[in-house]
Image (spheres, rainbow, N blue to C red):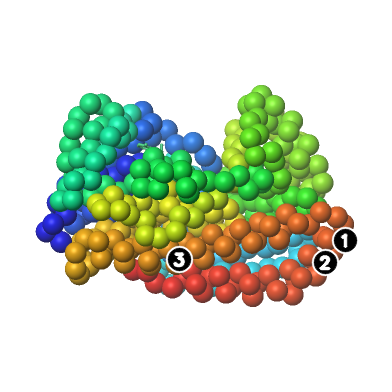
Amino acid sequence: MADIRRVLVVGGGVGGLTAASSFARRGVEVLLIERRPAFDVPGVGLGQPANALRIYDALGLLPDILASGFTYDRMSIFDPNRKLIAAHEFLLGDDRVPAFCALSRRRLHEILLAAAERAGATIRTGVTVSDIRDEKDRVAVVLSDGRAEAFDLVAGFDGIRSTTRQHLFGTAFVPRPSGYGGWRVQVPRCDDVRGMEFLQGVGSKTGAMPLADDLMYIFHIRPEAPDAVFRREDCADLLRERLAQYGSYVAEVAASLDAKSDIVYSPIEPVLVPWPWFRGRVVIGGDAAHTSPPHLTQGAAMAAEDGYVLAREVLDGDGPLEARLMRYSQTRYARSAFVYSFSYQWMLDEQSVRTPDDLEAARKELALNASTRIGASDRILDARVI
Ligand SMILES: Cc1cc2nc3c(=O)[nH]c(=O)nc-3n(C[C@H](O)[C@H](O)[C@H](O)COP(=O)(O)OP(=O)(O)OC[C@H]3O[C@@H](n4cnc5c(N)ncnc54)[C@H](O)[C@@H]3O)c2cc1C
């Protein structure tokens, strides 16, 4: 659409970089600003399901991503001693894209950043938005470096603590503590871990995701105080204590943790902003609009889909900008609301296993139904958005 010539993307995560590439490849002038001074991305790995891989394929990035990660097509659910309860072969992907490719977050960002730059987007780090004024036919923005600039559209992909969301909705929709938190640590891959694994424990869940031939990450989800902050030097002892009930490779990893282990803790704070996700010429996507528990490993995937679909609806859609942004909001809300509710329920169900009797009941139920349940979600997520 000729009415969108200049776009400001706020935030250089998976969603913002995908949006920047998607607009810039279509000839739109894009400025992406990232608050952090450099792209030294924290965090460990990201499982990227087929629906995310299709977006990266559309941007010409699939070979790089597949070459950088570990592909897998199944998940397994075990008891705390890694005795198999249920096995599931994902109903995701096709001849071109595998069900999953997991890779380090840092590598995914490098690939997406290089793609946005190649497409012609201008990237400025260490910059944020100081003021934003929607003036009907343009948005006037003052940046934190003092520059005042005008855009046809501002796309806020500024993550879970989004200030663009705050501009649109005040503090009405904010991430709320779930009472659960996730621990993650990257370790050498154990030979048996060739797909996503969950070990259902009593009072917590642990698991692993392969990231490369020689690397995997262990995650651990459990109740934690909403305001918990852990000192880096205490993390190894705290995680070791928390993993005490688990056997197999988890016990070996727990025993190996020390002060040098790169342990990351994040509280799980979901938020789902009701649509529409825009007002005037300012719109949000990614974690700014929806943050779900990590169980479906769809957070970055939904952010990538948002970025791509936003550019497509805005540039190819019919009617005034408001109608195009409304179509973006409606389609993206429906899909992210599914991820939000499915993952949230999964977390509550697994975390309600509090006694050995609960574990036995869960074991029976998971053996009967888990694969069918996850398969139903696979079919929804595998539906083509592009
Ligand atoms: C424990 C855990 C495990 C996860 N595992 C997976 C997984 O396996 N697969 C998956 O797909 N997802 C996973 N996720 C979710 C995933 O990390 C997020 O959903 C995804 O990173 C969201 O991307 P985003 O671009 O919307 O936001 P972000 O990645 O948070 O990026 C937002 C960017 O905006 C910048 N920013 C913020 N405010 C401003 C501002 N005012 N001005 C300028 N810049 C700003 C930030 O510095 C950041 O770089 C996991 C999440 C957690 C917590």
Disc 3/disc 1 C-alpha distance (Å): 35 Å
Q: Is residue 99 left or right of residue 251?
A: left
Q: What residue do we see at 37% from left, 56% from top?
A: 277
Q: Label 3: how many residues lie within 10 Å, few (<14), some (14-19) or many (20+)?
A: some
Q: Quadrant of residue 265?
A: top right
Secondary structure at numbered mark 1: helix
**Element under disc 2:** helix
Residue 357's label in the rendered image is 1
What amino acid is labelled 1 in the image? Answer: Asp
Within 10 Å of disc 2 (Cα), the crowding (few <14, some 14-19, many 20+) is few
Front: mark 3 or 2:
3
Residue 98 image position (x, y, % from top left): 47, 65
Residue 152: horizontal and vertical position, in percent? 18, 49
Q: What amino acid is labelled 3 in the image?
A: Arg
- Residue 310, compared with residue 34, is above or below; it is below
Q: Secondary structure at mark 3?
A: helix
Q: Are marks 2 and 1 in contact (CB under 8 Å)?
A: yes
Which numbered tag is attached to residue 134? Answer: none
Q: Earlier in the sequence, mark 3 or mark 1?
A: 3
Query: What residue does disc 2 label?
Result: 361
Expressed as whole percent of the image width and height from the top left, the position of residue 352 reads 76, 57
Which three-letter amino acid code belongs to the residue tagged 2? Ala
Q: Which residue is mark 3?
A: 335
Residue pictured at 40% horizontal, 60% vertical: 275
Ligand 1 has an atom within 8 Å of the beta carbon of the residue at disc 1: no
For the N terminus, which image quadrant? Answer: bottom left
Binning the other alpha carbons within 10 Å of mark 1 as few (below 14), some (14 to 19) or many (20 upward) gives few
